[in-house]
Amino acid sequence: MDVATTFKVQELQARYVQALDDDRLEDWPNFFIDACRYVVTTADNLAQGMPLGMIYATSRAMLRDRVRSLRDANVYEAQRYRHMIAPPVIEAGEAGVVHAKTSFMVVRIMHSGEAMMFVTGRYDDRILLEGPEAPRFVEKTVVLDSRVIDTLLAIPI
Amino acid sequence: MTTLSPGRQWPAEGVARVPYWVYSDRDLFDEEQERVFRGPTWNFLCLDAELPKPNTYRTSAVGAMPVVVTRDNEGKLNAFENRCAHRGSLLCINERGEARDIVCVYHNWSYDLAGNLTAVAFRKGMGGKGGMPADARPDENPPRKLKVETLCGLVFGTLDQNAVPLETYLGPEIVKGIRRVMRAPVRVLGGYSQMLQSNWKLYMENVKDSYHASLLHTFFTTFRLNRLTQKGGLVISESGGNHISYSLAADTGGKEYEQAGMRAAQEGFGLEAPQVLNHVDEYGDGVGLQILSVFPTFVLQQTRNSLAVRRLVTHGLEKTELVWTIFGFADDDESMTERRLQQANLIGPAGYISMEDGAAPGFVQRGVNTAADILSVVEMGGRGIKSDDTRVTEASVRGFWTFYRSQMGL
């Protein structure tokens, strides 16, 4: 992939994880187009061809609902993430869209100071790179390597 | 009654009190493995649909004991301990697979799919050297076999060959509740696990505690999915060990929450994309929520059109794996499958109405680890274990302890 495209994708990924790690959850839906798809699943579900997600959103409105629920309804201990992402592997897709696979690790830091390796996996993304809305995620499938989540998954990955 | 835990005696008040040592006593954990999990209880192993073909297996657990479930060449289900008769190695190291026989990876001892030892590698040695003595009995300590029974696609097993039949163990109300949900052949949609930092009993209490639902899970209440004022009730099996908590989908309640000024009732809170709540009454009875549990560690859940089975693996005193399998039915059309996937946002580790259940048992564990000799008061809805038409009760928690005590001799 050309340098300019690679740079755009890396920049988007970097800003995306920074928003989550900075607790700017309200900004998170804005990384997606309106008719987006955001699914958190496991490598095992995917390998078996099973469609289930831990989070399964088919619009930006659903992402905004999740943020409001996390802020106003759900009860969970104060915690932060630190995402580490690898350079993406990018392939050309349909007009104006690229496919990117990006490995990640997320360390979860509890208010108590306890930090743990929370999840690892890869983002399977379709990214819109052209037009007034760009760059944004058309589709983000978060494929977790493990099927086991410690305690709960509140903040998105 | 005899007790194996020296100095441990249940409080005189009975099941209206729960002593906190039940969550932190290491010896008690070991006794539970023997008396509860390897005792005359029926343990959920997997869905029938997880073994769709002959000559397949999947691994599961009974308490902490690793178990293999197989479907043999004739289609019959078997279950046995995942431990080789030889050196005790796991026989199956993968979660699932296809096999005509089970071969231990360590020394290639082979078993049929019913768990019978069929061959010992190099039993007669090689070139006249080595091998086992002629009078050796390699299957002296075979993997223990489970008695298996299936009800509506749910596969249960017990290690006690003298256990009462499954349906007797469940009780007629619970059998009815299972038949209601499992209305057709199952299609598995996927699964995941949560590692709970707590004792297994704290999670099962949480499941049976219909009182907490609308108080802890504020998403539920905010969107009027489940208010205690909503019509519903609680059914407890005669043994106390099994329960059903249910509520109708329509909200018929009043203003009790708002008047109490509870956190749960936040005015003007609406969803932009309410399809996560888009319920179709597939059972035709108006019931929008049915949580059913079977002692010791099985849960069958209908939250609107989101269906799941849950089971626990007791990895340690304070470490419990909650295994979820989410399913629909083979006759679901595409829109029904999509509806179930949308509503699966409500459940699991990231579930709008269940994420707190992963944490609450840990909150209790951390709270009581240094309070072994202090008692919890469990008197919501009285001190008995009767079925009720209210869910503002802890009757099924007391039912759990009633049955637990009878199994443990406590």
Image (cartoon, coloured by chain):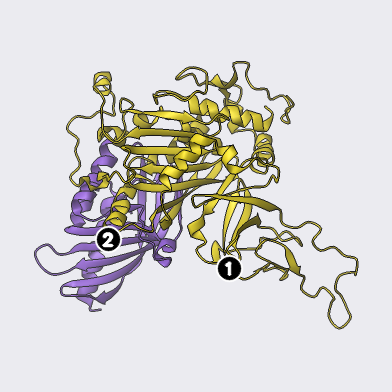
Chain colours: A purple, B yellow
Front residue of B357/B163: it is: B163
Give the mark toward the camera: 2 or 1: 1
Check the residue under mark 1 and report the chain it is in.
B
The quadrant holding residue B132 is bottom right
Seen at 26% across and 47% down, the residue is B276
The quadrant holding residue B126 is bottom right
Front residue of A97/B288: it is: B288
Front residue of B336/A58: it is: B336
Residues packed near mark 2 inside 10 Å, few (<14), some (14 to 19) or many (20 plus): some
Q: Which residue is mark 1?
A: B55
Residue B341: x and y, percent?
32, 53
Residue B291: x and y, percent?
42, 38
Seen at 45% across and 39% down, the residue is B177
Seen at 17% across and 32% down, the residue is B268
The span from disc 2 to disc 1 (Cα, nearest Å) is 48 Å
Residue A25: x and y, percent?
25, 47
Residue A149 appears left or right of A90 = right
Q: Which residue is mark 2?
A: A14
Specify the amino acid type for callout 1: Asn
Check the residue under mark 2 and report the chain it is in.
A
Specify the amino acid type for callout 2: Ala
